Image (cartoon, grey):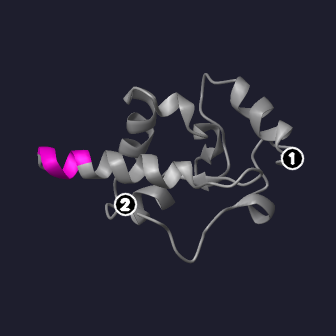
Amino acid sequence: MTPEQMRQFRDDVLNIVSQIPCGQVTTYGIIAAWAGWPSHSRMVGRTLRYTPGAELLPCHRVVNKEGRTAPGWSRQRFLLESEGVHFKPNGHVDMSRHLWEPDTLIV
């Protein structure tokens, strides 16, 4: 990725995350694909972790493809549950009920 592509990717990721509705989640991989870089799901996580101001976005609504929350961020589950997100007995988000995959995005 060129520096310009990296900036565009960051901006797209932050824009997509800002659109995740309350009570729903999406995955790092889906965000990467919507941003045009489908094999860059780990970069989505790094973008959310290291971009100043990202903490003001609903980053807690981003989980991995199995519905697992971010390791080391125990508050994420609390934030999701406070929005009505249900968890399965294995501790993963019930993706069949809460996965957000819009038809269109404003990118």
Q: How many C-alpha atoms fall within 10 Å of the one at disc 2: few (<14), some, or many (≥20)? A: many
Q: Which residue is at the front of the view, 103 or 71?
A: 103
Q: Earlier in the sequence, mark 1 or mark 2?
A: 2
**Image quarter (top left, top right, bottom left or bottom right) of the C terminus:** bottom left
The spot of residue 80 in percent (x, y) is 76, 40
Q: Secondary structure at mark 1?
A: loop
> Quadrant of the rendered structure where residue 89 is?
top right
> Quadrant of the rendered structure where residue 77 is?
top right
Determine the main secondary structure of the stretch shown in magenta. helix
Q: What residue lies at 61% left-to-right and 22% top-to-bottom?
A: 72
**Within the magenta stretch, is there residue 53?**
no
Find the residue positioned furthest to the left.
2
The spot of residue 7 in percent (x, y) is 24, 45
**Disc 2 designates what residue?**
35
Which mark is drawn over residue 98?
none
**Disc 1 designates what residue?**
84
Q: Is residue 27 left or right of residue 15?
A: right
Q: Which residue is at the front of the view, 39 or 34?
A: 34
Q: What residue lies at 72% left-to-right and 55% top-to-bottom?
A: 24
Q: What residue lies at 52% left-to-right and 75% top-to-bottom?
A: 104
| Range of magenta residues | 3-7
**Within the magenta stretch, is there residue 5?**
yes
Q: Do the residues bearing badges 1 and 2 touch, measured as CB atoms within 8 Å?
A: no
Q: Across the whole image, how many numbered discs are drawn on residues?
A: 2
The amino acid pointed to by label 1 is Gly
Q: How many C-alpha atoms fall within 10 Å of the one at disc 1: few (<14), some, or many (≥20)? A: few
Residue 41 visible: no
The spot of residue 19 in percent (x, y) is 57, 55
Q: Does 98 sit above or below residue 93?
A: below
Q: Is residue 2 left or right of residue 22?
A: left
Q: Does 12 sit above or below residue 74?
A: below
